Image (cartoon, rainbow, N blue to C red):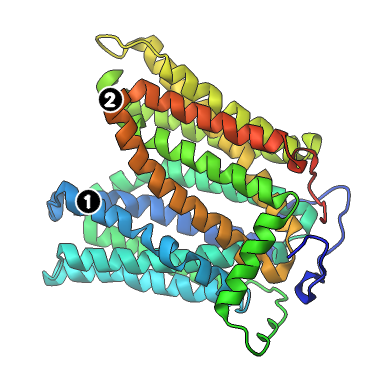
Amino acid sequence: MDDDADPAWAVDPAPAVVARPREVLRQPAFALFWSASTVRALGSAISGVAFNVLIVSVLHASAAQISVLSALSVVPYLFLGLVVGALMDRRRRQRTLVLTSVGRALALAAIPVLILTGALTFWTVATVTLVLGVLVLFADSAAQPLLPRLVPRESLILANARLGQSDTVAGTAGPALGGALLTLLGTPLLFAFDAVLTAVSAVLQSRIRVDEPAPASRAPGRHIGHDIAEGMRYTYRHRTLRPLALSIHTWFLGNSIVTTVFAVFVLRQLRLQPWEYGLALAFGGVGGFLGALLAPRVGARLGAGRAIFVARALVVVPWLALAVAPVGAGGGTALVALVASAQFVYCLAMGVEDPNDTGYRQSVAPDAIQGRMNSTIRTVNRVVFFVGALVAGVLATCFGYRITIGIGAAIFAAAALIVVFSPLFAARHGDRL
């Protein structure tokens, strides 16, 4: 399918672009969407602590079992991502959000029941993990294409920035709050608390008022495979979405490599203490929040393409710095400051890039193919990340952690170069290509 083609779904009743987007939190539909997302993110961050305790201290899971549980959270994306994305272009997205939140609340509530009845085993936890992974996949696949229906297209970068800010706060404060609540309430009640928060998010989502036109029926002789192929052709033949997708995939490869070895490199080779490592991660949270605050201004001033390029290029710096960091007998103040600064810049770059990247995608693609476009990019990202994590282990074994992180930094640089040498570099928010 060519970019110049004009299929039926290309006629999109999106609002026209205006000069100054108004504050999105003043728009009732988005305020409810943001509130539900924030509550759910906080609950997930809190219960994440309980999950770790449950797996390690209650189930006494082996390393192999922990790997299985980690993989189960990714498996739904690998096998169902494209299918679910295609379904979201033919289903009511708001209704899907509500139903998945109800399902997640029930799945989370099942854990304290299993604990109290003595039925908690590795396989019951694995089943709950897999169910939650499938529900999260449906929720993510519905949320991204729904957002352009809740706010004008010129407000998408600001809307994504607001969501990024609350996610960063939840991800930073949630684990600490979860640790405190775990001590006060215990594991069963903490999971019950997360189930209640998820149910609250379902109520908030059910109150969203959004105009979702009835999806067009599939033409005779077509099936879901045709829809998936159409979404992939649209994404990878589009003048600016193609380089954007390729740059994202490349970035995910670099990110999978550096994040796989980061903790062990910092704790074993740089010899930072656990509290110093935690402090460095906290600086990352600050950087991510600041980046999300700056993202709308950077996008408005530079344009979507240049904002994405700047963020992609900036992320190279902290990983290069870590690759050449000196290895001492102990962490030391200077080394702790280096690791903390690296995390700050890394998360700052992501905070600037994510709203501009996602907002641009949502503003360019017609509503009827949003689900497939997003799921195509997201699914390939998960596959790349999965492969990159395996590659990181091989590289670290053969060449050591420094060279592995340096290779990751080089891959990040390649992701930035894809942007600068493509039509995406000159793209601006609100372009309709």
Residue 35 screen position, x and y as percent: 57, 59
The numbered dot on residue 267 is 2
The foreground one among 102 and 269 is 269
Tell me: 147 left or right of 317: right
Q: Hey, what amino acid is under mark 2? A: Leu
> Which of the pair 334/390 is nearer the observer?
390
Determine which residue is flagged by label 1: 66
Q: Which residue lies at the image location 30% right of the left edge and 48% below the top edge?
A: 49
Tell me the SS state at disc 1. helix
Q: Is residue 31 left or right of residue 169?
A: right
- Label 1: few (<14), some or many (≥20) within 10 Å? some
When the figure is inspected, residue 335 is found, relative to residue 106, above or below; the finding is: above
The residue depicted at 84 percent of the width and 64 percent of the height is 15
Look at the image and tell me whether residue 145 can be seen: no
The residue positioned 72% from the left and 41% from the top of the image is: 296
Look at the numbered discs 2 and 1 and tell me whether their residues touch, using CB distance below 8 Å. no
Q: Which mark is residue 134?
A: none
Q: Quadrant of residue 88?
A: bottom right
Residue 225 is left or right of residue 325, and the answer is right
Residue 418 in percent (x, y) is at: 65, 37
* Gap in angstroms between the C-alphas marked 2 and 1: 20 Å
Image coordinates for residue 11, horizontal then vertical, percent: 82, 71
Q: Nearer the viewer, residue 334 or 318?
A: 318
Q: Residue at x 80, y 39 (%)?
A: 426
Looking at the image, residue 48 sits to the left or right of residue 217; the answer is left
Disc 1 residue type (three-letter): Ile
Return the residue found at the far bottom: 220
Task: Tell me how many marks there are.
Answer: 2
Within the image, what quadrant is residue 131 found in?
bottom left
Q: Where in the figure is residue 432, as x and y percent of width and height?
A: 82, 56
Q: Earlier in the sequence, mark 2 or mark 1?
A: 1
